[in-house]
Amino acid sequence: VRGAHGFGLYYDDCRFLRGYELRLAGDLADRLASSARKGTSMSIELTNPELKTSEKEKVPKERVGLSWHRDLDGQSLALHDTLNIENYGVSKAVIPLGLAFDARFEDVFVVRGLIDDCPGHLHDPAWDGNRLVFAYDGADGRRRTTAITFEPQPQKRNGTGVEWSVELDPQQRREIKVTVQASIE
């Protein structure tokens, strides 16, 4: 989510999503493997570092596995993510899982540093029901939006981030789905 970079979700020479970060109890997950055999999908295997989940409780390193599968749908301008979280331990684990997002709708020339600013009006991110919505009114008179939905609904919302407290019995798996929908009006 931080820093100058060219990563993101682009459409029509505009970056609709510039930040998307996953954290476990406030820490970044450890990457084990990744694959992007197709240009429109990828999989990432992650695990937890040692997590301090409360004053008295810790989750040992590599006790939880995360399989993150991503599909890009060019027809509907959507990014579909499925996160599977699994407890490989022999006792219950409670994992605070957070996602944070950022969208500024920069033109590709701004991202590359060829021009300094995007003409238009960037709206403050807002929640519309159960969707986190970023919006930008461009100088071309078109509104661009990035709407993010979650299944199940997050237990906490904090600005442009969401959190779940994922409770997992031994060998139990939970699934979280995230859809990032880009649109131009």
Image (cartoon, rainbow, N blue to C red):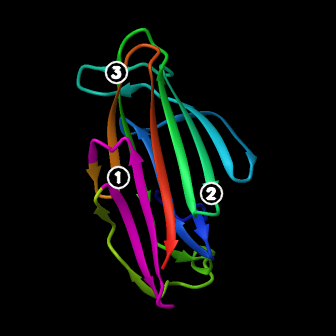
Describe the element under mark 3 as helix, strand or loop: strand
Q: Which of 19 and 70 lies nearest the eye of the viewer?
A: 70
Q: Is residue 28 visible?
A: yes
> Sequence-wise, which precedes: disc 3 or disc 1?
3
Q: Residue at x 62, y 49 (%)?
A: 71
Furthest residue in direction right, as rendered:
37
> Sequence-wise, which precedes: disc 2 or disc 3?
3
Q: Which residue is mark 3?
A: 58
Q: Amino acid at mark 2?
A: Asp
In the rendered image of this protein, does residue 173 appear above or below residue 104? above
Q: Which of 76 and 90 lies nearest the eye of the viewer?
A: 76
Q: Residue 177: x and y, percent? A: 47, 43
In the rendered image of this protein, does residue 27 appear above or below residue 133? above
Q: In the image, which is nearer the foreground, mark 2 or mark 1?
A: 2
Left or right of 67, for residue 147: left
In the rendered image of this protein, does residue 60 appear above or below residue 43? above
Numbered label attached to residue 107: none
Q: CA distance from mark 3 to mark 1?
A: 23 Å
Q: Residue at x 49, y 16 (%)?
A: 88
Q: In the image, which is nearer the foreground, mark 3 or mark 1?
A: 1
Numbered label attached to residue 73: 2
Describe the element under mark 2 as helix, strand or loop: strand
Figure disc tally: 3
Q: Are marks 3 and 1 in contact (CB under 8 Å)?
A: no
Q: Which of 109 and 82 lies nearest the eye of the viewer?
A: 82
Q: Amino acid at mark 1?
A: Gly
> Sequence-wise, which precedes: disc 2 or disc 1?
2
Q: CA distance from mark 2 to mark 3?
A: 38 Å
Q: Amino acid at mark 3?
A: Lys
Residue stretch in magenta: 130-156
- Asked whether residue 144 is drawn in magenta, I would say yes
